[in-house]
Image (cartoon, grey):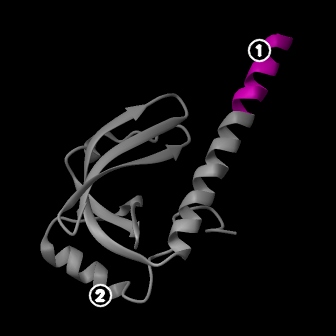
Amino acid sequence: MKTKSILTLVVVCILNISCKKEKSRICELYSNDVEYTIGTVQSITSSAFKATYNYDYSVLGINFKGKMKAYGIGQGNERFIGKQFVVIYEIGNESNSDLNTNYLIESEQDFEDFKSEFSSGPPPPNFPNNCK
């Protein structure tokens, strides 16, 4: 029983550290000079407490691959495979990106509306307490 409690505590600590690291990376990205493009989810790898979304996107004719990590129970949403979402990427470091699954792109007009709405800067990341 004691070993199980220690193991659970270790897993929770690792999950917490990993989540904070990814949150810091995304918060830093959103505070940099960024642009928008469209990315397509190619695959999702899920485990008990994390899902990794693998996506492709293109900037100025150059193709990039990105990974978005989502932490928590039930994060792997297989229905996102093949769907397109907004990708926020750093100008000058285009491989530094975030797939924003809050903004599904079903038409060119959806993307134009997004760019118009967020022309002064990206929407805040969808974290509890944003980037505080």
What type of secondary structure mainly makes up the magenta span? helix
The residue under the point 34% across, 64% down is 87
Indicate whether 80 appears above or below 1.
below
Q: Choose the circle earlier in sequence order: 2 or 1.
A: 1
Q: In the drawing, what numbered circle is on residue 116?
A: 2
Cα–Cα span, label 2 and label 1: 52 Å
Q: Residue furthest right?
A: 2
Q: Is residue 5 magenta?
A: yes
Quarter of the picture holding the C terminus: bottom right
Task: Please indicate whether residue 132 sits to the left or right of residue 104 in the image.
Answer: right
Label 2 Cα crowd, 10 Å radius (few <14 / some 14-19 / many 20+): few
x and y, in percent, of residue 45 in the image: 38, 33
The kind of residue tagged 1 is: Lys
Is disc 2 placed on a helix, strand or loop?
A: helix
The kind of residue tagged 2 is: Ser
Indicate whether 95 appears above or below 75.
below
Asked whether the viewer can see residue 74, the reply is no
Q: Nearer the viewer, residue 125 or 25?
A: 25
Task: Please indicate whether residue 2 sits to the left or right of residue 95 in the image.
Answer: right
x and y, in percent, of residue 82 in the image: 19, 47
Task: Please indicate whether residue 100 sits to the left or right of residue 7 in the image.
Answer: left
The residue under the point 77% across, 14% down is 4
Q: Nearer the viewer, mark 2 or mark 1?
A: 2
Please report the bounds of the magenta region as a residue range: 1-12
Q: Badge 1 is on which residue?
A: 4
Indicate whether 111 appears above or below 81.
below
Which image quarter: residue 118?
bottom left
Q: Nearer the viewer, residue 5 or 44?
A: 44
Which image quarter: residue 2?
top right
Is disc 1 placed on a helix, strand or loop?
A: helix
